[in-house]
Image: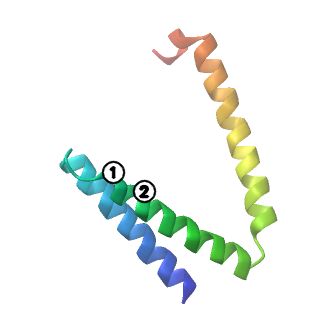
Amino acid sequence: MQLLMVMEECAELQHACSKKIRNINAPISKIAEEIADVEIMLEQIKCIWTLKYDVSEIKKVKLDRLKVLIEKESINPEDKK
């Protein structure tokens, strides 16, 4: 049941982002609210399947990779062209 709820909350976040893209006057607070809902549901899923450590380790690897890419881009901005 929680997986279904995660999917629903992600869909609501997607909808809020879409509305913001189409209408600059759409409140950014709606996106913040939906992000909070998604994060709460993700925390529940991590607890249910004891994934906190796994997710943390995968996240660290991906953020480290992103950091390297950002540093490389800031050193060699011409490489992007």
Toward the viewer: 26 or 22? 26
Q: Position of residue 59 (x, y in %)?
A: 71, 51
Q: Position of residue 16 (x, y in %)?
A: 31, 60
Above or below: residue 50 compared with residue 21: below
Q: Considering the numbered disc 1 on the image, is that residue within a helix, a strand or a loop?
A: helix
Toward the viewer: 81 or 30? 30
Q: Position of residue 34 (x, y in %)?
A: 42, 64
In the figure, is residue 60 to the left or right of 76?
right
Identify the coloring.
Answer: rainbow
Q: Amino acid at mark 1?
A: Ile
In the figure, is residue 26 to the left or right of 3?
left
Q: Residue at x 63, y 11 (%)?
A: 75
In the figure, is residue 56 to the left or right of 70?
right
Q: Residue at x 25, y 47 (%)?
A: 21
Q: Residue furthest bottom?
A: 1
- For the residues labelled 1 and 2, say whether their Cβ atoms are less than 8 Å apart: yes
Q: Amino acid at mark 2?
A: Ala
Mark seen at residue 28: 1
Q: How many numbered marks are there? A: 2
Above or below: residue 69 compared with residue 74: below
Mark seen at residue 53: none
Quadrant containing the C terminus in the rendered view: top left
Q: Residue at x 72, y 77 (%)?
A: 47
How many residues crowd mark 2 within 10 Å: few (<14), some (14–19), many (20+)? Answer: few
Mark seen at residue 32: 2
